[in-house]
Image: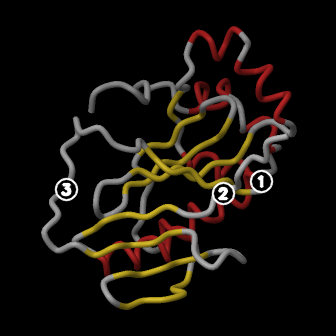
Amino acid sequence: MSISPTFAHVVFQTAQIDEMRDWYCALLDAHVVYEGHGMSFLTFDDEHHRIALAHNPDLVRKPDNAACVNHVAYTFPDLDALLDRYLSLKANGIEPWKPVQHGVTTSLYYEDPDGNHVEMQVDNFTTADEATAYMEGAEYDADPIGVGYRPELMVEARRAGVACAELQTRSWALTTSPELPHPMAAE
């Protein structure tokens, strides 16, 4: 019987170790576990480190057409926690690069100082089986990416008492933000 691994950490090479450290500490409410010898280790839970930064002053920002990891994602327990983090980050000058209602998740994409993308998300279904059923359905098959939405409108709706289940749908996003381009449209 094979045992599956558990995610441990991600390591980024960077020429901007201080900026990256500060950005990830703000984004993830993380703290520095160790720093020295050109490295910085960060965590936000009981793991000894979830993000490691390796300083290399000779690096340049990757071109947009480079082969690379597309993004790293972090999940929140519920929509309110995701929206609270959105507000906290916005107050600190960190704005999402692209909010996307995928249907299976409600997501906010951010870009770190080196141009790496980070997804902050909440699952829209209670179980993995429900999420899989949605991904096997017609709406997801027609557009697996999803639609853009305005997180500030979602915050306002939650404050007005709109249920999370209503907000965590593509139909809500389309109704409140119909003028937004498709998330995959060229910028």
Secondary element at image label 3: loop
In percent of width and height, residue 54 lies at 34, 73
Upstream in the sequence, badge 3 or badge 1? 3
Which amino acid does the dot numbered 3 rest on?
Arg
In percent of width and height, residue 33 lies at 54, 87
Foreground of the two, 151 or 37:
37
Q: Nearer the viewer, mark 3 or mark 1?
A: 3
Secondary element at image label 2: helix
In percent of width and height, residue 171 lies at 67, 24
The C terminus lies in quadrant: top left
The N terminus lies in quadrant: top right
Identify residue for label 2.
82
State left or right for residue 134 relative to residue 65. right
Residue sitting at 58 percent across and 32 percent down? 176
Task: Give the CA distance from mark 2 to mark 1.
Answer: 7 Å
Which amino acid does the dot numbered 1 rest on?
Asp
Residue sitting at 65 percent across and 26 percent down? 170
State left or right for residue 73 relative to residue 60. right
Q: Nearer the viewer, mark 3 or mark 2?
A: 3
Secondary element at image label 1: loop
Task: Give the CA distance from mark 3 to mark 2.
Answer: 29 Å
Identify residue for label 3.
61
Mark identifier at residue 39: none
Identify residue for label 1.
78
Residue sitting at 58 percent across and 9 percent down? 142
